[in-house]
Image (spheres, rainbow, N blue to C red):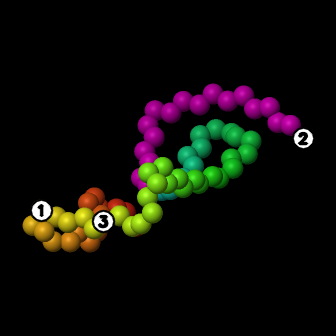
Amino acid sequence: MNFYIQQSIHINLLKVNSVSNSSVLQIGSSGIIKPASYLYNTGGFTGPAPQVSKAGGTTFEGPSVPLSS
């Protein structure tokens, strides 16, 4: 069964409080949204990244920006 939908959407203000990995923000109608998440090693790295340290030489143990839970 096929559906043909004609829409007219007017948005004056759109506020998004949170966006996470593989999120989908849908406005209107869609047939099928297939989730996809791809991970590529384009740099050819074979080991873990080196530890990041702050200006004082102390090891950094958290995100630089506060993240919401």
| Residue at the spot of label 3 | 50
Q: Is residue 14 magenta?
A: yes
Q: CA distance from mark 3 to mark 2?
A: 55 Å
In the image, residue 7 lies at what x, y percent? Answer: 67, 30
Q: Is residue 2 magenta?
A: yes
Is 23 drawn above or below residue 55 in the view shown? above
Q: Amino acid at mark 2?
A: Met
Q: Residue at horizontal 30%, vertical 65%?
A: 50
Q: Residue furthest left?
A: 56
Q: CA distance from mark 3 to mark 1?
A: 16 Å
Q: Label 2: few (<14), some or many (≥20) within 10 Å?
A: few
Picture quarter with the N terminus: top right
Q: Secondary structure at mark 1?
A: loop
Q: Label 3: few (<14), some or many (≥20) within 10 Å?
A: few
Q: Is residue 15 left or right of residue 5?
A: left
Q: Nearer the viewer, mark 3 or mark 2?
A: 3
Q: Secondary structure at mark 3?
A: loop
In the image, residue 13 lies at what x, y percent? Answer: 44, 37
| Residue at the spot of label 2 | 1
In the image, residue 58 lies at what x, y percent? Answer: 15, 71
| Residue at the spot of label 1 | 55
Q: Amino acid at mark 3?
A: Pro
Which comes sooner in the sequence, label 3 or label 1? 3
Q: Is residue 19 left or right of residue 56?
A: right
Q: Amino acid at mark 1?
A: Ala
